Structures are given as C-alpha cells and as structure tokens.
Image (tube, rainbow, N blue to C red):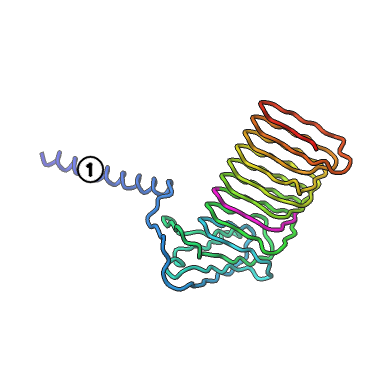
Amino acid sequence: MKKRTFFIFSALVVLVSCNERHEKKNKENNGWVEKVINKETGPIQQREFNGDFDEIQVSQAIDAEIIKSDTEKVIISAPQSIIDEILVENSGGKLHIHYKSGIRVMNINKVTAKIYTKDFTKLTAESAASINVKDKFTQEKTSVEISSAGSISGNLEANDFNINADSSSNFSGKIWAVNLDIESSSGSSIDISGKTKNADISSSSGSSISAKGVIADNVEADASSGASIQISAVSSVKAEASSGGSVDVARKGDLKNVTKNESSGGSVNIE
C-alpha cells in the first residue's frame, strides 16, 4: 500500500511539473500579459543607448524619430513609472525598441525614441508603433516593413526600394528609386509621391496604394480582392485587376506599351 501511495504521489508531481512547463510555454507563445500599465506617474526621464546599427525595428505603440547623425545612438524618453519597462536591444546591428515581455502599455502617448543614425537598410514598425524619418536619406538599398497598425513616414531614396505593408498599417512620404517594389494587403494604405524607373506593385484584401504622384517609366501592377492602385506611367504598363480590385494609371509622356487584364469585377483604367 505504501509503494502504491508513493507511486501515485510521484506521478502527480510529474504531471504538475509538466503542466507548469506547458502553461509557461503557452504564455510565451500567446503574447501572455503579466502587467498592464494604463497610467503614467513621475516626471519624464531619459535613457541613452550607444552603438552602431543597420536595421531599425520599433514595436508596441512607441513613437520614434530618425535623425541623420555621424554618431549612432538612441535616446528614450518616458515617464518614470514606465522607463524601466522599455528595452533597447542591439543584436548584430539589428536594433529593436519595445517593452519587456509580459508588459502592455495602454492609453499613454509619452513614450518616445529619438534614433540617431548614419544610414540604415531596413525599417520596421509594428503593433501601432510609428517611425517618422525627419531627414532625407539616400541609400543603395532600403526596405520598409509595416504591420499591425504600424506607420512609417519620411523622404527616402534608394536604388532598390522595397515596401511591405499589411494589417491596417500605413506608409507615407516622398520616394525616389530605380527599382520600386510594393506589396500591400489586409487593409493597409500607402500614400507616396516621387519618381522611379521600374515599379512593381501589388495590392490585395482591401488595401490601397495611392501613388498617382509617383511618375514611373515602367509599371507592373496587380490589384485584387477590393484593393486599389493609383500610379502614373511614362513608357509601359502591365496591369491586372481581379475580384473587385482596381488599377488607375495616369498617362505621362508617350505611353504606348499597355497590357491589361480584367477579371471577376476587376477594372483597369488608363487615363
């Protein structure tokens, strides 16, 4: 009887231990929130972080500004009650500004980051974070990624320029590029002006690309599932629209090479 009791007790210990590990893993994977902060206390404080970086990522409703500088650093400003919950991580030149795991900050607009940098190859804003590029940057390659109501704005130039937007995110500004590649989906919006040689643009699932102020020599555009694209073209256009999507191209110069394909209620207009 004692042996059986000991065996049952040991089995229960193993089950409890496994369950605790399982719950911990689920919390980590499901964005588990341990602490919600919806009120700031104390004066605004600042923390400075130094180090070189090439990619910049901002998350969780933090407002960031990017400023051109020969010295690369980050200055965080936040109320005293919050500043210790903010992480500035630099892993191999990949900068990530966000809150600690398990922390959710709500209804507070006093958390800001000033990012001083020589240049960058990639910008990412997610989870309602915003990045405002204050100065003009001219670079070989630039990649912009925005998701989950994140937003990025600025004046950017690059030979190869990629923009990827989804989940109600937003990008706006002035651009210049040799090759411009844009993908927009899930209710995201892009509003840009400028100039490019080659534009490859895709919009889907109710998203919109307002680029009528962009003059492109050559355009390839694909709109589907209620999405819309507006752009201006000089030399050639290859456009497809399906499932209620629309492509509107403003004719600039001697536009002779036009190919369009419409299906399932999609429309392509060349004006």
Where does label 1 land, which residue? 12
In the orientation shown, which residue stands out farthest toward the front?
A: 271
| Depth order, front residue of 20/185 | 185
| Depth order, front residue of 47/261 | 261
- The quadrant where residue 115 appears: bottom right
Residue at the spot x=72%, y=57% of the render? 156
Return the x and y of residue 151 as percentages of the image width and height. 60, 53
Which amino acid is tagged 1? Leu
| Quadrant of the drawing holding the N terminus | top left
Residue 157 is covered by the magenta coloring: yes
Q: Give the residues in magenta.
A: 148-158
With 198 as the anchor, is 128 left or right in this view?
A: left
Return the x and y of residue 131 as percentages of the image width and height. 61, 58
With 14 as the anchor, is 271 left or right in this view?
A: right
- Helix, strand or loop: magenta stretch: strand
Look at the numbered disc 1 and give the secondary structure of its residue. helix
- The quadrant where residue 242 appears: top right
With 65 as the anchor, is 219 left or right in this view?
A: right
Residue at the spot x=65%, y=54% of the render? 122
| Quadrant of the drawing holding the C terminus | top right
Residue at the spot x=74%, y=51% of the render? 193
Residue at the spot x=56%, y=57% of the render? 58
